Image: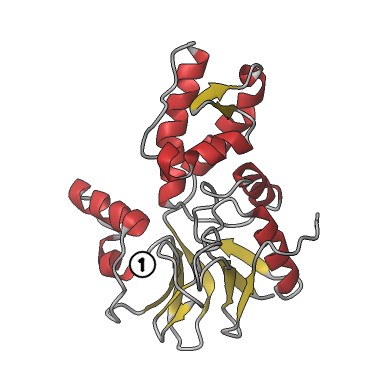
């Protein structure tokens, strides 16, 4: 069995299905987070990952959906006005709500679906699932360099020493860097880190101690982006796809 670590999907379900068809048969897919937002089919992506019980770490977009999505649910259930703009909605959260058939846009205003209270259960359940996602995963295999393989959303090496700290400040720093950091990892820790978060132009960024596998699949109109990629741990190969062709798989 091969481990194939998939970059930020961002709601691009068609690209994900095409990528699955390209990876070696019986591969164990692992996701670096940011399954949602920006693309038009976030609900489908989450459903696919959950249905097949595929490992995934938490990304900053899952965190935003947890925080702002929970507030959205609260407002809907209490018949309160919903926010028309916040940091999540303006960074792809609106597309996610639309993908769950919870809202639509009308004359520049977000409108609730007439039967939203019947549809919101799946959205709420997916948020509960996201709350349980880990910040990182240790794989039960080694990289060819002999290093432990660690999957995270953003580069984890800068704060790897803090992973077991019980101090509140260190816990907060570890979480913030792993979810939001844009720091290239220096070769200071005995790990091989596979992560995403910062889109790479043309191809994955591969080094002796890390791989950034985010190739900006949602940036379809930007030169050198628009691909969803996966890194095969055992072979070092990178598989990439887009949504230009589409074949449904179970």
Which corner quadrant holds the C terminus?
Answer: bottom right
Instruction: State the residue at coordinates (51%, 46%).
Output: 37
The residue closer to the viewer here, 236 or 136, is: 236
Q: Residue at x 47, y 32 (%)?
A: 69
Instruction: Judge from the rendering whether residue 170 lies leftward or rightward of residue 133; answer left or right.
Output: left
Q: Is residue 12 above or below residue 93?
A: below
Quarter of the figure that contains the N terminus: bottom right
Residue 219 vs residue 155: left or right?
Answer: right
Q: Position of residue 84 (x, y in %)?
A: 42, 27
Q: Nearer the viewer, residue 22 or 219?
A: 219
Query: Where in the figure is residue 80, as x and y percent of width and height?
Result: 44, 13
Q: Which residue is mark 1?
A: 155
* Relative vertical location of residue 74 with respect to residue 90 in this rendering, above or below: above
Residue 151 image position (x, y, % from top left):
46, 66
Task: Decide if residue 99 is on the left or right side of residue 187.
Answer: right
Q: Quadrant of residue 91?
A: top left
Image coordinates of residue 126 in percent, x first then y, are 57, 37
Kindly state the secondary structure of the residue where label 1 is placed.
loop
């Amino acid at each position: 069995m091969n481990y194939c670590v998939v970059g930020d999907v961002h709601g691009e379900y068609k690209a994900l299905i095409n990528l699955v068809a390209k990876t070696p048969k019986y591969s164990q897919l692992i996701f670096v987070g940011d399954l949602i937002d920006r693309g038009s089919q976030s609900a489908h992506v989450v459903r696919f990952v959950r249905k097949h019980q595929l490992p995934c770490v938490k990304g900053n977009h899952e965190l935003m959906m947890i925080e702002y999505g929970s507030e959205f649910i609260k407002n809907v259930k209490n018949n309160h006005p919903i926010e028309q703009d916040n940091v999540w909605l303006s960074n792809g959260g609106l597309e996610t709500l639309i993908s769950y058939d919870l809202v639509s846009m009308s004359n520049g205003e977000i409108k609730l679906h007439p039967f939203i209270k019947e549809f919101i259960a799946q959205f709420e359940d997916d948020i509960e699932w996201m709350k349980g996602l880990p910040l990182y995963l240790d794989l039960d295999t080694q990289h060819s360099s002999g290093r432990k393989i660690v999957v995270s959303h953003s580069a984890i090496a800068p704060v790897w020493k803090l992973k077991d700290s019980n101090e509140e400040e260190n816990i907060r720093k570890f979480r913030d860097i792993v979810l939001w950091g844009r720091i290239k990892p220096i070769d200071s820790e005995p790990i091989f880190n596979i992560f995403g978060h910062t889109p790479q132009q043309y191809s994955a960024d591969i080094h002796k101690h890390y791989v950034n596998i985010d190739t900006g699949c949602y940036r379809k109109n930007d030169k050198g982006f628009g691909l969803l990629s996966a890194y095969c741990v055992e072979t070092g190969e990178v598989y990439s796809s887009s949504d230009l062709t589409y074949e449904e798989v179970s």
